[in-house]
Image (cartoon, rainbow, N blue to C red):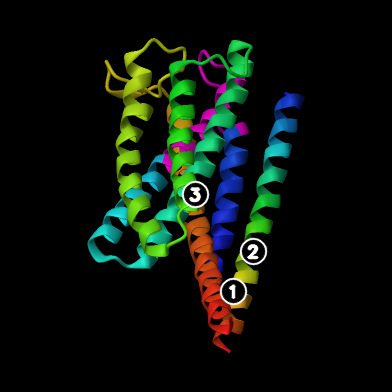
Amino acid sequence: MTDLYFVLAATLATWLGLFLYILRVDLKIREAERREKI
Amino acid sequence: MAAKIILGIWLAAVIIASFVYMSSTQGLGETGRIIIYHVPAAWIAVLAYLMATVNSLGYLRRHAIRLDRKAKVSAELGTVFCLLATVTGAIWSKAAWGLYWNWDPRQTSIVVLLLVYGAYFALRSSIADEDRRARLSAVYAIFAFLTVPFLVFIVPRVYFSLHPDLINIKERSFAMDRKMLVVFFSSLLGFTGLYAWLYNIRLRLEKLLHRAETRGEKHR
């Protein structure tokens, strides 16, 4: 059971890290697009 | 932005549900939980390759370079998700069969698929002229997709494979209980949303790079 929760925690942490990274890239692209328009 | 946050929470909920709400799979035990990630990754690979083909067909009809860009981005994402399906499959294989790789028909066919699309990128990088590159790679992408149903659905079912099947062909039903089906389809939906988001990001980045390149050529 402990192993299962360890895998759950690792998978969740990986997803949250990846999600925040993708969100950051998205915002950076939005910023570049905004600068292009200016 | 709200849709992106919802997607993040949705997939986090899917992860938690796949470990807490869903019971372990019959015959596969705890390792069977990987189905919730492995199958949607393979599904997105097929969807992305299909999108690459549709955009390639569109390019050949209309000769719009934006369609070539869409085809390229889709093929890239298809390959990323295909690699993800390969890696998750290998992890499960180690737990179930004791080996990461044993050239099972499923494993062999996915490697062939990766090579087919690897050649697509090799072709693209070998042609400097934009129109010629777009035309030739569109034709190649259409032929490449013809192998997808053959390699993903037919080959593993023609040859003997240890790979478990999600669909019980004789009973025409899913080999999953109700709880697992709920988590599985939620995961499929979440992965499709993730693909749409990544596709959007990559396409916008491609447009920015194209504009920067065009500006650079003008300044020369």
Q: Secondary structure at mark 2?
A: helix
Disc 1: which residue: A30
Both labels 2 and 1 in a single chain: yes
| Residue on which disc 3 sits | B76
Looking at the rendered structure, the kind of residue marked 1 is: Arg
Q: Earlier in the sequence, mark 2 or mark 1?
A: 2
Residue toward you, A33 or B144 = B144
| Residue drawn at x 59%, y 14% as measured from the top left | B96
The three-letter amino acid code for the residue at tag 2 is Val
Where does the magenta region start and end? B19-45
Relative side of B102 to B110, left or right: right
Residue drawn 71% across and 32% down?
A7
Residue B178 lies in the magenta stretch:
no
The mark closer to the camera, 3 or 2, is: 3
Within 10 Å of disc 3 (Cα), the crowding (few <14, some 14-19, many 20+) is many
Percent x, y of residue B46: 39, 40
